[in-house]
Image (cartoon, helix red, strand yellow):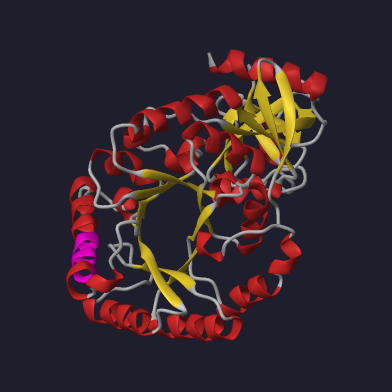
């Protein structure tokens, strides 16, 4: 089945392609993944939030936004912020990492250049410690703004953020003291460690349960000790694609971030995500084919039997695995190349110059910005969508 799919895609690329490496989106699989997400969210009390870095293409985000009926986004790269505000008039944006105050200052200094009228209340700035919150307070006073502040809490990933109740209380106290400049908008706890910890150390179920308990403790401190900051519409964000299914089953959050699960690159080949399909490929043309690999300085190996032919492709060395032809792989001795990578292809495979090899990206966020366009592939047709490269 896979062979038939990629053979047909090769023929369509030969007719409509560019003759250069192309990033391919299988639109039918993308829609199927969106439908799976939609069905799981229907039974969960969670609002979806699309992670822009994982879906770094405005048309890709538009399709997901319309299907899931959401304009909630998580942004990790500041240039994406103005693009979103220009395209999605009701965008609710949560920063996914703390931004240096200089970057935030630049954003507000340049906001007149956005050519769009937007309420600053649609942006939630992520804050991880007291020093950064004090910097943001000074900036808010400088620009006469009231900034929405979402506090990053450490729920087990140990990548920074609030890790002690005393630290948490100090942040909340500073917000409480400056209501004209700082407004608490919620909490964010990222739990990527749940799926990545070796099971010999801790099961995903136990790890998820502990992360949820930690999250709930901070919610309780907020509600009991700072009731004046508690609002019914606070954003309690959590998740990420690896724990999407667990949050849909039970979560202390009300706001669920995800993106990669909709494309399912290789790093998201997890048991809990088995219902989703890979929808993203790299297609690279074959430039040259040799009957076998010839290693400079080791010509003596040329006399040995060879199970692979050597193909040199246009490009290479992406964060991706070769997926077709099956059992294709880089040569360990010849080395990698981002210009003309040598790929070992099983000898029995019928491939020719100008055919394509296909790779599955490890992460969409690492690969999409390397390509100027994403080609949506549907019913034999390829449509170019611009990516977010800056």
187 left or right, relative to 338? left
Q: Nearer the viewer, residue 234 or 56?
A: 234
- Residue 192, percent from left and from top: 36, 54
* Residue shown at 28% from the left, 76% from the top: 168
Q: Nearer the viewer, residue 173 or 389?
A: 173
* Residue shown at 62% from the left, 31% from the top: 25
Residue 234 part of the magenta-drawn span: no
Residue 217 part of the magenta-drawn span: yes
- Residue 144, percent from left and from top: 57, 81
Q: Can residue 305 be seen in this view?
A: no
- Residue 273, percent from left and from top: 37, 34
Q: In which quarter of the image is residue 127?
A: bottom left
Q: Is residue 280 visible?
A: yes
Identify the image quadrant of the C terminus: bottom right
- Residue 126, percent from left and from top: 45, 68
Q: Is residue 194 above or below residue 155?
A: above
Q: Total number of numbered labels?
A: 0
> From which residue to which does the magenta span run?
214-222
156 left or right, relative to 124? left
* Residue shown at 23% from the left, 81% from the top: 166
281 left or right, relative to 67? right
Secondary structure that dominates the magenta span: helix
Q: Nearer the viewer, residue 241 or 247?
A: 247
* Residue shown at 32% from the left, 36% from the top: 272
């Amino acid at each position: 089945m896979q062979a038939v799919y990629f053979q047909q895609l090769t023929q369509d690329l030969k007719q409509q392609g560019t003759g250069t490496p192309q990033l391919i989106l299988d639109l039918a699989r993308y829609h199927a993944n969106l439908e799976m997400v939609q069905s799981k969210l229907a039974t969960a009390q969670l609002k979806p939030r699309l992670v822009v870095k994982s879906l770094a293409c405005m048309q890709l985000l538009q399709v997901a936004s319309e299907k899931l009926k959401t304009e909630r986004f998580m942004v990790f790269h500041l240039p994406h912020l103005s693009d979103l505000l220009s395209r999605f008039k009701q965008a609710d944006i949560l920063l996914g990492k703390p931004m240096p105050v200089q970057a935030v200052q630049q954003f507000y200094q340049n906001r007149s250049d956005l050519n769009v009228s937007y309420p600053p209340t649609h942006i939630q700035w992520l804050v991880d410690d007291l020093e950064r919150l004090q910097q943001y307070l000074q900036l808010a006073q400088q620009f006469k703004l009231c900034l929405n502040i979402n506090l990053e809490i450490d729920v087990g990933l140990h990548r920074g953020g609030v890790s002690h109740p005393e630290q948490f209380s100090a942040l909340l106290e500073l917000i409480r003291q400056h209501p004209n400049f700082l407004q608490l908008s919620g909490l964010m706890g990222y739990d990527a460690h749940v799926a990545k910890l070796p099971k010999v150390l801790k099961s995903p179920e136990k790890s998820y349960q502990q992360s949820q308990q930690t999250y709930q403790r901070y919610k309780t401190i907020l509600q009991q000790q700072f009731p004046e900051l508690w609002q019914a519409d606070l954003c309690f964000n959590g998740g990420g694609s690896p724990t999407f299914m667990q949050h849909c089953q039970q979560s202390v959050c009300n706001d669920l971030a995800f993106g990669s699960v909709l494309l399912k690159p290789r790093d998201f080949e997890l048991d809990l995500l088995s219902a989703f399909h890979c929808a993203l490929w790299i297609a690279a043309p074959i430039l040259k084919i040799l009957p076998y690999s010839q290693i400079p300085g080791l010509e003596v190996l040329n006399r040995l039997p060879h199970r692979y032919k050597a193909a040199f492709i246009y490009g290479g060395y992406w964060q991706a695995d070769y997926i077709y032809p099956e059992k294709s792989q880089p040569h360990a001795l010849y080395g990698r190349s981002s210009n003309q990578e040598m790929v070992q292809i099983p000898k029995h495979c019928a491939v020719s110059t100008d055919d394509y090899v296909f790779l599955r990206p490890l992460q969409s966020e690492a690969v999409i910005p390397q390509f100027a366009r994403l080609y949506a592939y549907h019913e034999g047709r390829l449509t170019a969508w611009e990516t977010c490269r800056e």
